[in-house]
Image (cartoon, coloured by chain):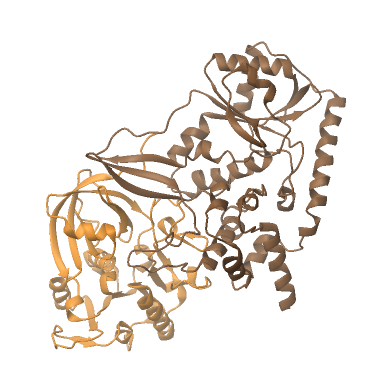
Chain colours: A brown, B orange
């Protein structure tokens, strides 16, 4: 993978040129006590962009998969997703890149055709990711085999150094951006061994810290293997009875939850087909006409949520549909914790033997 | 975007036939031709109300029209039942895998239907009869709740008449007023699977009906000696997008809308709770 160095001053110059060309730019900014993706419209905001922070409060999901949109009408009219000339999302973390990979699998490969609304947005967006600078107590990407720095799935990745960035090029779209940078007058140079060492040491230190923080959740069995023997576990009933309040928070904040609901609504003489985010813990989610419900109990629906992420997706694509971002735990009023749940299942399985 | 998979094709309702007090057959003419394989399903839209999945009950060889036999059970079907000929509906599809007809060739084909579950099986049966020389034997076992609940009353008697190529067994769960057609027994559909007189080593069974009927019929067929890979089941799930994405029809790792709706029992037998 090609690596280059760019100084902050040079990068900001490039950003300014993209704004002049009317590209859409989104980057993590600090808003009150949270880090959020905000639209950058003024070069004055460049200084506030956080590259070396931690995951944003909300993932990049909604950039590609809108919470609500009209996907068709009857009679037919020309419904198509909003087209971007070019859009850059910066400061995307490794966990969100993993989630985008899940979406790519689900929306490009799992379906019978590439989902056109997702595809349109995905293709017109450049993803500039960046290494995490610190961790939250809910972070557990390392437990799932990932790292707190991106290793794949980006167009460009930025590792923050003292006064600039190491830029890794991860795709053809990344090459395009490098070319654009050159054309804007930005200077890119080779990465020096000292800079390389700084990047490595930052990455290793944070990885070690994360692994240390997650040591108490380390279990010998892989999560998909545990699911296979946990269908009848009493854990699901415990989660349903004592913790879950069915608020849908976990599924909506989840960067990998990709399910949706289609419904039709009348508007004047049109029938609009609306697509909104959906959640598999809703009672009516799998119910068929006539009332039969394959998952009538909350515990069976909670189990399905875990199994889709940690078993079925592994069986279909050999990867977890979980990025280890920990957002679900942060928003859960009942404090349902993925790490804890698997640790409990592991304990239960051990006791049974 | 080349084509929008959420956009239905408009279709005109040509004819509505009452089958039972709560089941009607709708003949629709899509404004663009739609070709499908028997066993594949369509999403039928009632404009402004919503869409729901149905498998056509007509043969794919009829190109300009499609028939759907629909029970009134929910919002969309309620509205459909109120529609009159001339109304405009929408169609998306076809979706899923159809019946694997090539796997049935040269075999004795047993079709077991319950209630409105005969709808997709009628499409299959009509398709098989079009090339009946390809199949060693075709047998239909159909059970309805009562004589009033038998669908395709006209056709069923017709099928009984083509005896040489088709063996038909009918049954109703109850017949209080003694109104059942000639040759129709009383008892659950599983009773028609007794002494089938089929060469089970060279036979496939195709089952469609309500979940409870599918469960007991499958158990009965296994008991008769059918191998799990020779029992084909139509799984009714909440198919919505039809594309294999939205998640509503997930059955274990499968998306019923794209991996099904027809599965062999072999594919499903290790999944807990498949009959609910």
Image label count: 0
Quadrant in the picture for residue B32: top left
What residue lies at 63% left-to-right and 12% top-to-bottom? Answer: A184
Tell which of A333 and B242 is nearer to you. Answer: A333
Question: In the figure, is residue A75 to the left or right of A251?
Answer: left
Which residue is at the front of the view, A346 or B222? A346
Residue A158 against residue A7 in the figure, above or below: below
Residue sitting at the far top: A185
* A326 is higher (above) or lower (below) than A346: above
Give residue B61's position: percent from left, percent from top: 22, 56
Residue A2, image x, y percentages: 72, 27
Q: Quadrant of residue A294?
A: bottom left
Q: In this view, does A166 lie above or below A181?
A: below
Looking at the rendering, in which quadrant would you find the C terminus of chain B? Answer: bottom left
Q: Can residue B157 be seen in this view?
A: yes
* Residue B203 seen: no
Going by the image, does A343 lie left or right of A278? right
- Of the pair B211 and B41, the residue shown nearer to us: B211
How far from the left and from the top, in percent, is residue A172?
A: 61, 28
Q: In terms of depth relative to the viewer, which is nearer, A60 or B229? A: A60
Q: Where is residue B180 in the image (x, y as percent from the top left)?
A: 15, 84
Left/right of residue B151 with respect to residue A281 in the rendered view: left
């Amino acid at each position: 993978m090609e690596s280059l160095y760019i100084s902050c001053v040079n990068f900001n110059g490039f950003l300014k040129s993209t704004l002049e060309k009317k590209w859409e730019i989104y980057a993590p900014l600090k808003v009150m006590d949270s880090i959020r993706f905000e639209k950058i419209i003024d070069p004055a905001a460049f200084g506030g962009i956080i590259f070396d922070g931690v995951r944003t409060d909300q993932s990049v999901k909604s950039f590609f998969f809108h919470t609500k949109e009209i996907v068709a009408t009857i009679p037919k009219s020309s419904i198509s997703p909003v087209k971007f000339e070019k859009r850059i999302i910066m400061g995307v973390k490794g966990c969100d890149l993993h989630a985008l990979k899940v979406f790519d699998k689900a929306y490009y490969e799992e379906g019978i055709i590439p989902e056109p609304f997702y595809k349109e947005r995905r293709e017109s967006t450049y993803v500039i990711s960046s290494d995490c600078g610190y961790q939250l107590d809910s972070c557990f990407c390392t437990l799932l085999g990932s790292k707190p720095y991106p290793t794949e799935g980006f167009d460009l990745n930025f590792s923050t150094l003292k006064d600039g960035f190491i830029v890794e090029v991860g795709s053809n779209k990344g090459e395009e951006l490098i070319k654009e940078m050159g054309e804007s007058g930005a200077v890119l140079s080779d990465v020096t061994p000292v800079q390389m060492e700084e990047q490595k040491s930052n990455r290793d230190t944070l990885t070690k810290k994360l692994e240390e923080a997650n040591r108490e959740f380390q279990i010998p069995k892989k999560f998909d293997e545990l699911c296979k023997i946990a269908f009848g576990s009493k854990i699901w009933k415990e989660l349903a009875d004592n913790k879950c309040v069915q608020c849908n928070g976990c599924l909506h904040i989840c960067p990998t939850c990709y399910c949706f609901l289609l419904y039709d609504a009348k508007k004047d003489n049109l029938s609009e087909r609306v697509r909104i985010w959906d959640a598999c813990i809703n009672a009516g989610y799998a119910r068929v006409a006539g009332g039969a419900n394959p998952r009538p109990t909350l515990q069976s629906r909670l189990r399905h949520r875990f199994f889709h992420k940690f078993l079925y997706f592994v069986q279909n694509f050999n990867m977890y549909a979980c990025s280890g971002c920990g957002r679900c735990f942060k928003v859960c009023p009942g404090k349902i914790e993925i790490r804890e749940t698997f640790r409990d299942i592991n304990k239960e399985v051990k006791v049974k033997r | 975007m080349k084509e929008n998979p959420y956009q239905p094709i408009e279709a005109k309702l040509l004819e509505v036939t009452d089958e039972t007090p709560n089941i009607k057959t709708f003949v629709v003419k899509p404004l663009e031709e739609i070709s499908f394989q028997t066993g594949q399903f369509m999403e039928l839209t009632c404009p402004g109300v919503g869409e729901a999945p149905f498998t056509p009950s007509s043969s794919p060889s009829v190109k300009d029209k499609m028939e759907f036999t629909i029970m009134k059970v929910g919002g969309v079907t309620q509205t459909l039942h109120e529609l009159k000929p001339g109304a405009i509906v929408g169609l998306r599809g076809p979706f899923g895998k159809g019946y694997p007809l090539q796997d049935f060739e040269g075999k004795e084909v047993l079709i077991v239907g319950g209630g409105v579950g005969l709808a997709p099986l009628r499409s299959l049966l009509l398709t098989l009869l079009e090339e009946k020389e390809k199949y060693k034997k075709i047998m239909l076992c159909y059970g309805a709740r009562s004589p009033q609940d038998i669908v395709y009353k006209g056709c069923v008697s017709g099928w009984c008449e083509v005896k040489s190529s088709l063996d038909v067994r009918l049954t109703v769960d109850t017949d209080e007023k003694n109104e059942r057609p000639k040759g129709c027994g009383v008892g659950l559909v599983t009773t028609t699977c007794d002494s089938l007189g089929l060469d089970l080593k060279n036979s496939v069974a195709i089952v469609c009906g309500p979940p409870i009927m599918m469960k007991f019929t499958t158990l009965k067929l296994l008991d008769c000696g059918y191998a799990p890979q020779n029992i084909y089941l139509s799984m009714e799930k909440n198919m919505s997008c039809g594309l294999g994405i939205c998640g509503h029809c997930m059955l274990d790792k499968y998306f019923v809308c794209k991996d099904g709706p027809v599965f062999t029992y072999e594919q499903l037998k290790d999944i807990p709770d498949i009959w609910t």
